[in-house]
């Protein structure tokens, strides 16, 4: 069955879109013809993109794309000089707000482009005075606040490499990443509020860097006034002291391919992967997706519920600044102290684009749409969504009950390694619930079977057939792991690790991670499809479906559900099994349905099915430092143990 389109832009909205502006620049008639040309000739598209964003190179690049070392190691804008901090601040209205910030406790601040530029210069001077320079790695363990933006730009300005860290990381996770890159300095806050509690982040960093011999300095930004903060003389520096060391007018000459960021992602086994990104890659891809997908331009106010340790943190910073927009930063729990918190933020900050996750929407849906009706949301032009696949019920709740069918949901999927999206809705095409209207421009996306052949109307591997500007420049210190992870399944083709399908109308759907494959009696199904059936039951709020060994079928489905209220029963679990069998077919009836307190998720809301499966089967979990609540794994393991006893 083909899912109908839920929202269609009118002709006026299409005419005003940044994407339409780009269509005119490129001389193409419509999105379809532009997309086809953008992947048929990625160099032509990239040149058009650099022109659209007014990215200037000094000296000019000698060659736009060099694949002489293989497509896996593509180099862009070869020989060109580019320090992205200059592009982020040049040519802007200095009186315009660059950063608007609101904390969980209701405190607000704002910096103009002029104020941001001054703080970047002061931070750069302070860093140079502490001996930090080109090629040095620096940890950024800060909440989303104006100082975080200045730090990211200052590090680029002096040619250093920013290593963003989740604020929720414990000492071991921080130490592991700082040791891996040989960081010389780390930024942290003295503390930050979460759900009314004060988290002493400086104490966590102190414990972490006791294991990091290379770190010489800790710069402490005050986030919570009056919080007692231990300071080590000679090593620790306050933000104020750092910024009193002068105003540095010098921008370090950096090449387009010089490293800018190392962003870590966690796997279920082995050490975390440090994704390397360059000055001419991550920021430009971010800005392109933000402009063409979310219609961000001069003075557009965009907010996203994120953390600097998730790629959407740097994405928000670089993209909004390159486009001359205003980023609205929210620091805190978006549903605390009440379920209207994020809607109040959107109204107060006059946000046009509000980025949310399906996990957050499921949490808010429980409280009802009345909380959103307390605020007009009159400034909103669209919701953004990324991080995980949708289920239909929460998608429709956001679109119908909160947005009243007037505010589109721009679905966006890619990854840290992509520097943005592979797939994205956009302002000139209609949207389908939980789906994607098209790939992003310049992304030669495809869905393939196990032989690498293109397929339509069935679930397959999501791949990218050509290089793109924002692609990762490998894993830090581990080139073989990078090649094994993405390039060696289908030689010369990027295998992203997601299952996807393309329907009869050409719309795309993500069906979960391909590592989470469910194949029962020869039939392959994406876990999101099973989960959508389960959460369609009125008593189920969340679900995770995983494949488990089965002596007869090879694999069977085990499903874990979180109820909206009350306790589970054998009768409910059998009802849920039957529901899946009726909607997806008897072979896909789950072998087990287990009621749990919560589904293990990362701090940015991504559901971790592989860890659920490992806990249920008693296998090693691997790296769990990105989890919001690792105790949930123990509860899943205990549930299996209790089931065996009974």
Image (cartoon, rainbow, N blue to C red):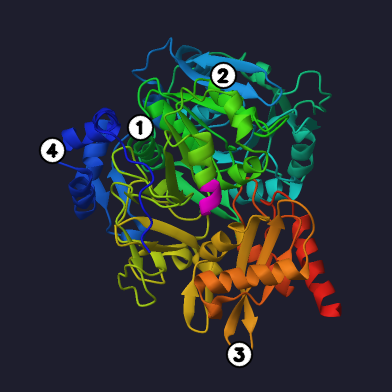
Mark in the foreground, 3 or 1: 3
Q: Earlier in the sequence, mark 2 or mark 3?
A: 2
Residue nearest the observer in this picture, 317 or 278: 317
- Residue topped by disc 1: 295
Q: Which mark is residue 152?
A: none
- Residue topped by disc 3: 552
The picture quadrant where one finds residue 301 is top left
Q: Earlier in the sequence, mark 2 or mark 4?
A: 4
Q: CA distance from mark 4 to mark 1?
A: 19 Å
Q: Earlier in the sequence, mark 1 or mark 2?
A: 1
User: Could you say whether the residue bearing mark 2 is in a helix, strand or loop?
Assistant: helix
Q: Give the overall secondary structure of the magenta segment.
A: helix
Query: Within 10 angstroms of label 4, few (less than 14), some, or many (20 or more) residues?
Result: few
Q: Which residues are magenta?
A: 390-395
Q: CA distance from mark 3 to mark 1?
A: 52 Å
Q: What residue is at 41 percent from the left and 70 percent from the top?
A: 488
- Residue topped by disc 2: 348
Measuring from the top left, give residue 524's x and y in whole percent.
48, 75
Mark in the foreground, 2 or 4: 2
- Residue topped by disc 4: 27
Q: Earlier in the sequence, mark 4 or mark 1?
A: 4
Callouts 3 and 4 close, C-beta under 8 Å: no
Residue nearest the observer in this picture, 588 or 55: 588
Q: Is residue 489 above or below residue 248?
A: below
Q: Earlier in the sequence, mark 3 or mark 4?
A: 4
Callouts 3 and 1 close, C-beta under 8 Å: no
Q: CA distance from mark 2 to mark 4?
A: 39 Å
Mark in the foreground, 3 or 4: 3
The picture quadrant where one finds residue 366 is top right
Q: Is residue 129 above or below residue 139?
A: above
Q: Is residue 6 above or below residue 377?
A: below
Mark in the foreground, 4 or 1: 1
């Amino acid at each position: 069955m083909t899912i109908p389109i839920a929202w269609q832009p009118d002709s006026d909205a299409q005419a005003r879109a940044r994407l339409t502006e780009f269509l005119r620049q490129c001389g193409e008639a419509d999105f379809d013809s532009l997309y086809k040309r953008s992947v048929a000739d990625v160099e032509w598209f990239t040149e058009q993109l650099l022109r659209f964003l007014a990215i200037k190179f000094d000296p000019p690049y000698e060659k736009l794309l060099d694949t002489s070392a293989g497509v896996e190691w593509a180099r862009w804008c070869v020989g060109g000089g580019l320090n992205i901090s200059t592009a982020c601040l040049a040519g802007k209205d200095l009186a315009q707000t660059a950063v608007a910030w609101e904390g969980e406790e209701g405190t607000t601040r704002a910096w103009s482009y002029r104020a941001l530029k001054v703080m970047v210069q002061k931070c750069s001077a302070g860093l140079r005075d502490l001996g930090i320079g080109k090629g040095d790695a620096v940890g950024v363990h800060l909440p989303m606040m104006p100082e975080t933006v200045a730090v990211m730009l200052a590090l680029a300005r002096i040619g250093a490499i920013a290593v963003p860290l989740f604020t929720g990381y414990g000492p071991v996770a921080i130490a592991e990443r700082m040791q891996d890159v040989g960081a010389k300095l780390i930024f942290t806050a003295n503390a930050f509020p979460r759900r009314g509690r004060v988290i002493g982040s400086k104490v966590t960093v102190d414990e972490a860097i006791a294991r990091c011999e290379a770190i010489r300095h800790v710069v402490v930004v005050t986030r919570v006034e009056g919080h007692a903060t231990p300071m080590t003389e000679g090593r620790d520096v306050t933000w104020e002291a750092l910024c009193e060391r002068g105003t540095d007018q010098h921008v370090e000459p950096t090449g387009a391919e010089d490293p800018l960021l190392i962003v870590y992602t966690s796997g279920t086994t082995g050490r975390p992967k440090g994704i390397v990104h360059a000055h001419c890659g991550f920021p430009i891809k971010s800005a392109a997706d933000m402009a063409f997908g979310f219609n961000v331009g001069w003075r557009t106010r965009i907010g996203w519920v994120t953390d600097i340790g998730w790629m959407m943190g740097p994405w928000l910073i670089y993209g909004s600044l390159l486009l001359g927009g205003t980023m609205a930063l929210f620091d805190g729990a978006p549903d605390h102290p009440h379920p209207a918190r994020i809607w109040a933020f959107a109204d107060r900050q006059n946000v046009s684009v509000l980025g949310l996750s399906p996990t957050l929407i499921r949490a808010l849906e429980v409280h009802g749409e009345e909380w959103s009706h307390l605020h007009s949301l009159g400034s909103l032009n669209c919701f953004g969504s990324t991080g995980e696949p949708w289920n239909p019920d929460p998608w429709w709740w956001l679109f119908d009950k909160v947005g009243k069918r007037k505010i589109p949901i721009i679905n966006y999927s890619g990854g840290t390694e992509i520097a943005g999206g592979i797939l994205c809705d956009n302002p000139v095409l209609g949207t389908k619930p939980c789906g994607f209207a098209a790939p992003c421009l310049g992304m030669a996306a495809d869905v393939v079977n196990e032989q690498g052949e293109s397929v339509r109307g069935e679930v397959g591997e999501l791949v990218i057939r050509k290089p793109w500007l924002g692609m990762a420049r490998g894993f830090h210190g581990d080139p073989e792991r990078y090649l094994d992870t993405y390039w060696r399944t289908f030689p010369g083709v990027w295998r992203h690790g997601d299952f996807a399908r393309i329907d009869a109308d050409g719309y795309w759907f993500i069906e979960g991670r391909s590592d989470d494959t469910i194949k029962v009696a020869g039939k392959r199904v994406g876990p999101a499809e099973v989960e959508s059936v389960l959460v369609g039951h009125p008593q189920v709020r969340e679900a995770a479906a995983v494949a488990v060994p089965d002596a007869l079928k090879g694999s069977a489905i085990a499903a874990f559900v979180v109820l909206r209220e009350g306790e589970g029963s054998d009768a409910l679990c059998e009802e849920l099994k039957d529901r899946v069998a009726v909607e997806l077919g008897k072979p896909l009836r789950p072998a087990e349905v287990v009621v749990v307190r919560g589904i293990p998720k990362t701090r940015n809301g991504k559901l971790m099915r592989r860890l659920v499966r490992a806990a249920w089967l008693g296998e090693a979990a691997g790296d769990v430092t990105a989890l919001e609540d690792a105790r949930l794994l123990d509860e899943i393991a205990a549930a299996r143990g209790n089931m065996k006893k009974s």
